[in-house]
Every structure is written in C-alpha cells, then in structure tokens.
Amino acid sequence: QVQLVESGGGLVQAGGSLTLSCAASGRTFSSYVMGWFRQAPGKEREFVSAIGWSGRPTYYLDSVKGRFTISRDNAKNTVYLQMNSLKPEDTAVYYCAARRTIVEVTRPRGYDYWGQGTQVTVSS
C-alpha cells in the first residue's frame, strides 16, 4: 500500500547538518505513523525518531534529542529528519518506515513498510 524512498544522505564533517527526506507513494500517507531508524555495520537496527499521523506526538532517541527534528508534510506525502550538530557516532544507513498504529513505535517489528536506506557518514 505504501512505497518509501529516502534521500538526502551523504558525507558531512562533525558539527555539520543534513536533512533526510522520505517520499511516500499513494494517497493514504496521512494514515500512517512514520519512523526513522539507523543501522551501523555489525550493529542492530536502532530507533531514531517517530511522528504521529498529524505531526504529533513525536519521539526521539535520547542521544539525538535537541539535535534532530522530525516533521511531515502530508500534502507532499513526505517525512523529514533534520539533523544538526552531527557526530561521528551518527554514521549509519538511515531508513524510514511506516506503520498503522502508534503503539511501541521504537521497535522495528510492527512497521509494515521500509525504504531502501540512505547512507550518512560523519567525519571527525
């Protein structure tokens, strides 16, 4: 029902900024809770942020609070992750995902649709 395509990843120096975008297909985008996850080599997929149907509530991994901001534009079928003050520890492949409910949004299980991922590399 939903196809997701991430973009906006790249190389950035520590302290810099990037904004990731996730474009969704279809006309039911506003029905889904959207999340961002990341995965570094050899590590488990990690929750980063999530946002409710209408743009609230929002959820963040503790280590990114105050640095990352999630937002969505339902008219454009797009969710964003603005990342400021980036650190080398933020280096990972970032994935967006969609689910129908807001229960246990920090867990990968329960998200029905996933994008292909976009690489974020932060140098020191």
Image (cartoon, rainbow, N blue to C red):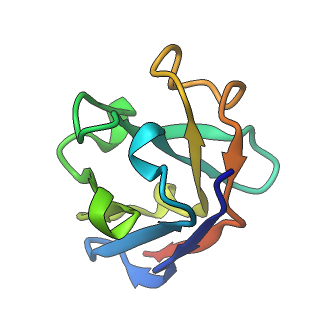
- Left or right: 47 as drawn, with respect to 87: right
- Left or right: 9 as drawn, with respect to 81: right
Farthest-out residue, left? 66
Which of 104/53 is in front?
Answer: 53
Number of numbered markers: 0
Provide residue 93's location: percent of width, then percent of height: 64, 63
Q: In which quadrant is the C terminus drawn?
A: bottom left
- Left or right: 100 as drawn, with respect to 42: left
Farthest-out residue, front? 27
Farthest-out residue, bottom? 11
Q: Name the residue located 23 percent from the left edge and 41 percent from the top edge.
A: 55
**Above or below, 61 relative to 41:** above
Q: Name the residue located 68 percent from the left edge and 50 percent from the top edge.
A: 1
**Above or below, 26 relative to 50:** below
Q: Quadrant of residue 4?
A: bottom right
Provide residue 113's location: percent of width, then percent of height: 69, 47
**Above or below, 69 relative to 98:** below
- Left or right: 102 as drawn, with respect to 109: left
Q: Name the residue located 34 percent from the left edge and 75 percent from the top edge.
A: 18
Q: Name the residue located 64 percent from the left edge and 54 percent from the top edge.
A: 2
Q: Quadrant of residue 77?
A: bottom left
Provide residue 16's location: percent of width, then percent of height: 27, 76
Provide residue 70's location: percent of width, then percent of height: 29, 50
Q: Quadrant of residue 43?
A: top right
Farthest-out residue, right? 42
